[in-house]
Amino acid sequence: MGSLRHVSGVRNVARAAAQLVYARWRRLPLSETVLLESYEGSAPACNPAAIAQYLLEHTDLPLVWALREPMDFGDPRVRSVRYRSAAYYRALATSTYLVNNVTFPPLFDKREEQTYLNTWHGTPLKKMGRDVDGPHRWIANTVANFDAADILLSSGPYMTRTMYAGAYGVSIDNVAELGSPRVDVQFAPHPAPDVVLYAPTWQEASYTDAVDDLADVGARMRAIAQGVPDGLQPMVRVHGKLGEKARTDPGLAGFLAPDDVGTNALLARTHTLITDHSSIAFDHLATGSRILFFTPVAYPRGVYLTDDELPGPRTESLQELQSWLTGEAPAAGTPPEVARARFCAHEDGHATQRVVSRLLATTSD
């Protein structure tokens, strides 16, 4: 018990110190800089990465990446700060533009002159927010970030209604239905699709922690590979919560998609996507049409769509999935073109341009 009190005490001291540092930096003038953060500093990825690349190519704004492991970008206009360090809080307090695909820490207090774009990281298939049984504290910081944002990015009406207005109950006055910057790369020229990609989501140990089910994922991947036709390459991309451990898992050796290929760049090469409850299905739908839903384990949160609404057939049977790979799969509950109009009508390869234009225009208004 004593050790738990000690850990709690250390955390409280660290939190108080961060608040003092952040409050001090908030008194400084703003810098014409863009602070970008993805997945709580895990990597320069997702929508913020697409936005960063566009900013580098079309503006002269300096960029700061918040990363758990800072890196050298080899570009004088781009630097990184360690996530939740003093330098991080200074960038959070003094950057004119703030871009995040999840949430900034609870002490975040946006200054009136700052512009905050929250891009989120996918169109929801799994239930979220108030649609999940649990205390309000689980979602309190997400709601606070959504309320603070000047721009809440949405892929379209389904995401706006289901997630922002529904699951989190926030005002949608600041929602911009502009599409997903991370999906733009799928519209770029690429070789003929040759990958069968298995991309399962994470199973919950708690609201934020994942179950280590890599042994099961590896066994399923080996079975999937047996059903993949000649000329196609079987690959797996595990959720980021398990990504580091997956790199050293012998059961996944030879199947893991390369770390240096982003998920959406990988989807541009994907002939068939196999997933369960992941929003990656909607990303692939923007440019592809063959999606197989494989749900061997029921997701405890539940999902928003019935089988009739899914843009692909669903099975719980690995054997049936194998037969779909080697032969004809049943028709989707909703034809791909109908699902595309419902879930990703704004995906056209130009979402990043629209989003950056909105971001920069908001500050000048």
Image: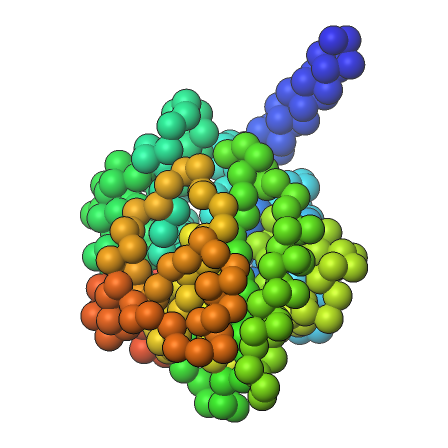
Location of residue 13 (image quadrant): top right
Q: Is residue 38 visible?
A: no
- Using the image, determine if residue 265 lies above or below residue 28: below
* Residue visible at 38% across and 59% down in the picture: 314
Q: Is residue 171 left or right of residue 282?
A: left
| Residue 223 drawn at (x, y percent) | 61, 65
- Could you tell me how many numbered marks the image carries? 0
Quadrant of the snapshot with the C terminus:
bottom left
Quadrant of the snapshot with the N terminus:
top right
* Residue visible at 48% across and 71% down in the picture: 323
* Residue visible at 35% across and 64% down in the picture: 313
- Using the image, determine if residue 100 lies above or below residue 21: below
| Residue 101 drawn at (x, y percent) | 46, 53
Q: Nearer the viewer, residue 232 or 199?
A: 232
| Residue 106 drawn at (x, y percent) | 50, 32
Question: Which colouring convention does the figure follow?
Answer: rainbow
| Residue 362 drawn at (x, y percent) | 31, 58
Q: Is residue 306 visible?
A: yes
- Using the image, determine if residue 25 lies above or below residue 310: above
* Residue visible at 38% across and 28% down in the picture: 133
Of all residues, the one furthest to the top in this rendering is 2
Q: Nearer the viewer, residue 246 or 42?
A: 246
Q: Is residue 291 left or right of residue 45?
A: left
